């Protein structure tokens, strides 16, 4: 699957020196796994429920969540000590251990933007304080709500299925809606109300009529 250009694939490697983490995007050439060694790298495959229909049976476990919220099923293969670093997801995620063992740690402290490592295409946290941890074995499931920092490290090679459910913020919804309007709506141009009355003493005033016209222009979109 990682060699298929129709599949979104990534490899995250932990390095011994700065920047300490490296992201490579697929597709990858045959035998790529031999190039990365036996430890400290992870392969991520997105949208596996679309590429492997048999995986959709996993979704039957989650009928208590509306189907429209499903983002995707991501499969990760990790060599020993493989990880994608401490990070935060902005959606509900269920981590299903399919093979091997992975140790998960969480940090529920609020995450500040300046806590992200600079100059890398990954949202990896600079500081992470372990509050709780669990060792997941095949068949175990760990739920993580949006905004909870977590860090999973493979103990031996392992495979984990990540089932993600969208949890948009109000800003996300507004951005999507406005973007849709801009792409599909007909743009209406503002014009002054008929026979505007302008007070020369305060010509910069935004009058109630102006506000009504602006609202009408926005509503027409």
Image (cartoon, rainbow, N blue to C red):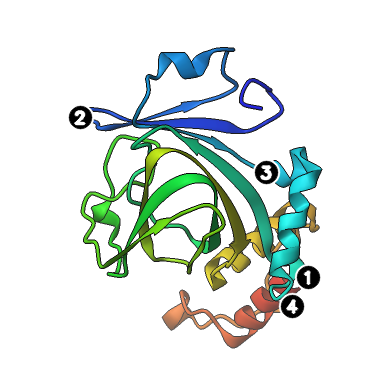
Q: Comparing marks 2 and 4, which lies closer to the viewer?
A: 2
Q: Is residue 217 above or below residue 56?
A: below
State the separation of the CA atoms marked 1 and 3: 38 Å
Q: Which residue is mark 4?
A: 194
Spot occupied by residue 28 in the image (x, y as percentages of width and height):
56, 18
Of circles 1 and 3, the one toward us is 3
Q: Pinpoint residue 132: horizontal percent, then vertical percent.
A: 29, 67
* Disc marking residue 18: 2
Q: Nearer the viewer, residue 159 or 76?
A: 159
Crowd tier of the residue under label 2, counting other residues whose Cα lies within 10 Å: few below 14, some 14–19, many 20 or above: few
Q: Which residue is mark 1?
A: 220
Q: Secondary structure at mark 3?
A: loop
Asked if one can make out residue 191 in the rendered structure from this viewpoint, the answer is no
Q: Which residue is mark 3?
A: 47
Which quadrant, please, contains the C terminus? Answer: bottom right
* CB atoms of marks 1 and 2 within 8 Å: no
């Amino acid at each position: 699957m990682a060699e298929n250009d129709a599949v979104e694939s990534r490899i995250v490697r932990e390095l011994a020196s700065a920047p300490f983490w490296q992201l490579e995007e697929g597709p990858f050439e045959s035998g790529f796994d031999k190039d990365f060694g036996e430890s400290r790298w992870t392969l991520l495959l997105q949208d596996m429920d679309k590429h492997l229909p048999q995986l959709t049976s996993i979704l039957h476990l989650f009928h208590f969540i509306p189907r429209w919220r499903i983002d995707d099923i991501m499969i990760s293969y990790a060599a020993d000590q493989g990880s994608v670093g401490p990070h935060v997801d902005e959606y509900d995620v269920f981590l299903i251990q399919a093979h091997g063992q992975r140790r998960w740690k969480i940090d529920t402290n609020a995450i500040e933007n300046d806590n992200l490592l600079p100059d890398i295409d990954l949202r990896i946290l600079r500081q992470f304080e372990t509050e709780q941890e669990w060792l997941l074995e095949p068949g175990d499931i760990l739920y993580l709500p949006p905004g909870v920092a977590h860090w999973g490290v493979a103990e031996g090679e392992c495979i984990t299925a990540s089932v993600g459910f969208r949890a948009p913020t109000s800003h996300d919804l507004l951005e999507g809606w406005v973007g849709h309007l801009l792409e599909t709506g007909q743009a209406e141009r503002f014009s002054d109300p008929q026979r505007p009355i302008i007070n020369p003493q305060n010509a910069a005033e935004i009058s109630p009529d102006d506000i009504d016209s602006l609202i009408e222009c926005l509503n027409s979109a």
